[in-house]
Image (cartoon, grey):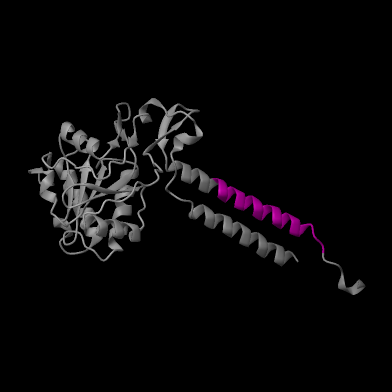
């Protein structure tokens, strides 16, 4: 009986630990449990502006510091994946780009051949040398020919960045104290003529959905609005009055489940130790 109890306890604890490991990294708006967003996040939002045109004449700098226009990366019939992050981001921007890279590797369409990817920094102080490092990293991870010519990391002046962000409904804020940006994590798929076709929220993008979005955009189709589940780079702790990584909630959740699993193990083991089997000699 003790061994059976032990097996049950270990199985229960293992299940709880597995749940902790699989806790989703894509969390809903962390302000929902607070009721009112702190001032910094009040203006951080996404307006889905499907079928609207992005300004093709906006000027940015490519990875070599050369001035380029946004329209250079658009070709009729060839969709564009647009992401807006900042290259010195210590938080979820990396997870967003990692998630995009993982999804793109799982679809048969190829960067540079079938579509373009444009990643624009929202930080006007980011330099082309950092953009080049990012491009080399992610195209290397992607590992297909022509990727370096198809995934573009751009920097630019604040006016040009804001104009692009406003055109796609991407509203972010800057925290001067921490010198970091508060923003939502997402990517957008645009048609080859620069119209917004689809929004994908979070840091994980199902490859099947992304492939379908690219195929529809390549045919000039505009998708439907999707439910917004915003994942912020920042969340607000009402007890400390400070901002922190929203991903820390996942860590806290995993820790709580782990403690619960350990507690369950101890409980069942103690129950097993207190249970005495009948003496078969007196049966």
Q: Where 111 falls versus 173 (above or below)?
A: below
Residue 224 is left or right of residue 283, and the answer is: left
Q: Residue at x 70, y 56 (%)?
A: 268
Tell me residue 228's x, y (percent). Answer: 39, 43
Give the side of residue 86 with respect to residue 28, left or right: left
* Residue 273 lies in the magenta-colored region: yes
Total marks placed: 0
Which picture quadrant has residue 231?
top left
Judging depth in this view, the residue of 201 and 215 nearest the camera is 215
203 or 7, which lies in front? 203
Which residue occupies 51% across, 48% down? 254
State which quarter of the image contains the C terminus.
Answer: bottom right
What segment carries the magenta color?
256-276
Q: Quadrant of the N terminus?
A: bottom right
Q: Position of residue 255 (x, y in %)?
A: 53, 46
Residue occupying the point 50% across, 35% down: 33
Residue 69 falls in image quadrant: top left
């Amino acid at each position: 009986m003790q061994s059976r109890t032990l097996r049950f306890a270990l199985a229960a604890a293992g299940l709880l630990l597995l749940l902790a490991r699989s806790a989703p990294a894509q969390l809903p708006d962390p302000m929902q449990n607070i009721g009112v967003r702190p001032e910094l996040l009040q203006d951080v939002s996404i307006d889905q502006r499907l079928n609207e045109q992005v300004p093709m004449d906006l000027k940015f700098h490519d990875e070599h510091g050369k001035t380029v226009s946004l329209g250079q990366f658009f070709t009729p019939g060839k969709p564009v994946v647009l992401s807006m992050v900042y290259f010195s981001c210590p938080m979820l921007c990396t997870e967003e780009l990692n998630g995009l890279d993982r999804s793109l590797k799982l679809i048969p369409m190829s960067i540079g051949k079938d579509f373009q990817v444009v990643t624009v920094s929202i930080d006007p102080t980011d330099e082309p040398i950092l953009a080049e490092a990012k491009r080399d990293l992610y195209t290397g991870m992607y590992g297909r020919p022509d990727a370096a010519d198809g995934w573009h990391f751009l920097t630019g002046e604040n006016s040009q960045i804001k104009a692009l962000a406003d055109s796609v409904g991407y509203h972010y804020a800057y925290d001067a104290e921490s010198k970091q940006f508060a923003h939502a994590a997402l990517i957008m798929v645009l048609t080859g003529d620069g119209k917004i076709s689809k929004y994908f929220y979070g840091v994980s993008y199902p490859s099947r959905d992304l492939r379908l979005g690219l195929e529809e955009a390549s045919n000039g189709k505009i998708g439907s609005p999707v439910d917004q589940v915003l994942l912020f780079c920042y969340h607000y702790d009402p007890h400390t009055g400070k901002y922190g990584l929203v991903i820390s909630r996942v860590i806290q959740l995993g820790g709580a489940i782990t403690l619960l699993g350990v507690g369950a193990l101890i409980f069942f083991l103690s129950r097993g130790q207190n249970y005495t089997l009948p003496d078969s000699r007196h049966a």
